[in-house]
Image: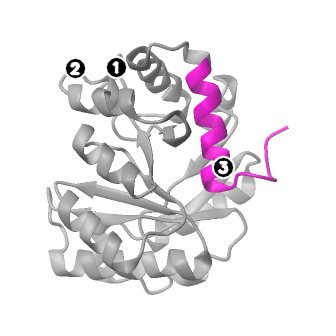
Amino acid sequence: MVAEARAAGVTRMVNVGTDVASSQAAIAVAAANPGVWATAGVHPHDASGGIEGLEGLLSAPKVVAVGECGLDYHYDHSPRHDQRQVFAAQIALAHARRLPLVIHTREAWDDTFDVLVSEGVPDVVIMHCFTGGPVEARRSLDLGAYLSFSGIVTFPGAPEVREAAALCPADRILVETDSPYLAPVPNRGRSNRPAWVGLVGAVVADVRTVPTAEVAALTCANAIEAFGLTGGEAP
């Protein structure tokens, strides 16, 4: 996957953890591959299990953020009270470690903003796999967050996400794949891969009426800035 992505021009990748085990795996992949970094976090689906063991991972080499964490009221795999507690605990870790926070929110925008504001917004916040429209985009941007667009921006049924991509300031926009999920058109339904992030960038460029190369350059620069991706690059 890493070699394929590099061949497609993807020079830096952030591998996102969703529980302690997957965070450990992401850290191992980052350690073995130049140009790959990791995050460590507990997804709301797994919030009922708590965050024991997570804090120790945050000091591992090449860990660049806390998350993904947040609230998911679509599936409610964990009780909402547990989700909010575990989200708040990870916001506290982001503050304590002075690390960016990667947020997952689905059908839980109001509570996500409420918890975030009540716990204090970290210096860097990334709205991972952004699924909102202009209203949610502006609320996120007002808090200083980055908006990270995935393959959803290419889906015909997601015009509101494209509207958000069009209005997002150039210094606050990111692109991602959320691999292995949400493969962009024309690969929808297949297992997603980092090499396809350019398909996301191309649609973002189209809605912003700028060249794809411009979106590639600015989202790369924004990712380096947001996550602090210095050292450990691929040659």
Looking at the rendered structure, the secondary structure element under dot 2 is loop
In the rendered image of this protein, does residue 160 appear above or below residue 156?
below
2 or 3: mark nearer the eye: 3
Q: In the rendered image, is residue 191 in sight? A: no
Apparent side of residue 31 relative to residue 160 in the rendered image (left or right): right
Quadrant where the C terminus sits is top right
Q: Nearer the viewer, residue 233 or 88?
A: 88
Classed neighbour count for the residue bearing mark 3: other residues with Cα under 10 Å, few (<14), some (14–19), many (≥20): few
Q: Say whether residue 189 is magenta.
A: no
The residue closer to the viewer here, 193 or 104, is 104
Residue at x 34%, y 20% (from the top left corner)? 185
Tell me which segment is drawn in magenta.
214-235
Identify the mark at residue 185; answer none if there is no mark.
Answer: 1
Q: Amino acid at mark 1?
A: Val
Q: Residue at x 42, y 69 (%)?
A: 19
Identify which residue, 37 or 227, lies in the foreground.
227
> For numbered disc 3, what is the local secondary structure?
helix
Residue 159: % across, % down: 22, 25
- Tags 1 and 2 touching, CB below 8 Å: yes
Q: CA distance from mark 2 to mark 3?
A: 31 Å
Q: What amino acid is found at the position of numbered circle 2 in the picture? A: Pro
Q: Earlier in the sequence, mark 1 or mark 2?
A: 2
* Among numbered discs 2 and 3, the one appearing first in the sequence: 2
Marks 1/2: CA–CA distance = 9 Å
From the image, tell me which residue sits under label 3: 225
Residue 135: tell me if it is visible: yes
Count the numbered circles shown: 3
Q: Which three-letter amino acid code belongs to the residue tagged 3? A: Glu
Instruction: Give me the C-alpha separation between circle 3 and circle 1.
Output: 28 Å
Q: Residue beneath label 2, please?
A: 156
Residue placed farthest to the right in the image? 235
Contact, CB < 8 Å: mark 2 with mark 3?
A: no
